[in-house]
Image (cartoon, rainbow, N blue to C red):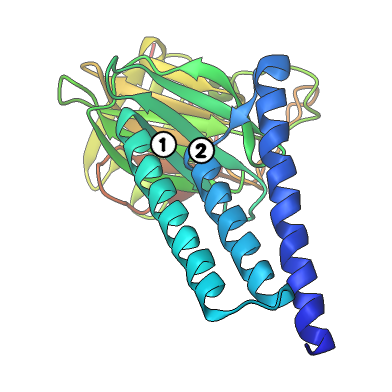
Amino acid sequence: MKKWVKIIGILIFLIAVAIFCLQLGSFIAQPLYQAEYIDNRLFYLFNIIIVLSLGISMLLLLSLNKRRITIIVTIGIIMTAINVYLMYESNQGIKNITSVSPSGEEVFAIKSNTYTGEATYYRSYFRILGRPHKELSQVIEKGGPINWLTDDIAVFTYLDKNQHIQQFVGTYGDRQDGRSYYYVGSQIRGNWQGENTRVIANSDGITIMQQGNDHFFDWDHVQQYGTLAIVLSENDQAKWTIALGADFSFDDHTPEPPTGEIILYKAKLKNTEAIALEYIGEAQSMQ
């Protein structure tokens, strides 16, 4: 046996051992820390990797006759097929809605129980583990796109049981020092201008002006997510998400206006282009 073949076999075997230890660790973490895989399908995917790694390492490290090779390959195929089937069945009961940020640093995850209709948003820990963080207020009837407006803001658009469009926002960052909570609405007070679009935020609410159409939302119809985004709603369904851009900055201790961009994203069940807007001046109350 060539030396490099043996080295590859040992490395593949060590991969199988490492992932097996990871699986054991996940069983321990669940009762101790209420943490589980951020996506349930990972459990079966890791099982498949373990089976394939063990099979390949045995073929590379051991001197086997054709009969034993056939047995190992057959067992590997059967075990892989079983885990693929179990992964499919698991996802029928618990729908996993998962997306990784463009930077690879954050994971947006929702688990929706198809039997009860309950949907739970999970916060990720160490990328692959997560804890339940918040229940969605509406049942997910039909899932739509997940759009990352920045590396730390993900917007999930979906249809609820009343056939209303809803938006849920996962936020993972901060635009200050992270030590205090602040209201997005108060930080974006002013006039904001983008391509064929203007946003006016004042003490009365927020007005969206686009292609000759003006749409006003009072503050009772504005819901905040984290400290980075708000969703504007009308007639029990989402209309727009406004998020703070990655370069957005403000200082509560000075009268200076905010710098950077805000991002406007329309609630649609298909991918739509986000609109970046820049501050152009103060906004007066309509009263």
Question: Which quadrant would the C terminus be assigned to in this image?
Answer: top left
Instruction: Quadrant for residue 259, please give it.
Output: top right
Q: Residues within 10 Å of mark 2 (few under 14, many from 20)?
A: many
* Identity of the residue drawn at 54% across and 40% down: 43
Q: Residues within 10 Å of mark 1 (few under 14, many from 20)?
A: some
* Identity of the residue drawn at 53% across and 38% down: 108
Out of 221 and 254, give the one closest to the viewer.
221
Q: Which residue is mark 2?
A: 39
Number of marks present in the image shown: 2
Q: Please tell me whether residue 86 is drawn above or below residue 119 in the rendered image.
A: below
Q: Please tell me whether residue 91 is drawn above or below residue 15 in the rendered image.
A: above
x then y, percent, for residue 286: 38, 17
Q: Which residue is mark 1?
A: 96
Q: Secondary structure at mark 2?
A: loop
User: Along the horizontal axis of the image, is 72 left or right of 120?
Assistant: right
Q: For residue 268, which numbered disc appears in the image?
A: none
Q: Marks 2 and 1, Cα distance to the nearest angstrom?
A: 6 Å
Are the two marked residues, 2 and 1, in contact with CB atoms closer than 8 angstroms? Answer: yes
Out of 85 and 218, give the one closest to the viewer.
85
User: Along the horizontal axis of the image, is 188 left or right of 141?
Assistant: right
x then y, percent, for residue 232: 36, 25
Q: Earlier in the sequence, mark 2 or mark 1?
A: 2
Question: Which quadrant would the N terminus be assigned to in this image?
Answer: bottom right
Q: Secondary structure at mark 1?
A: strand
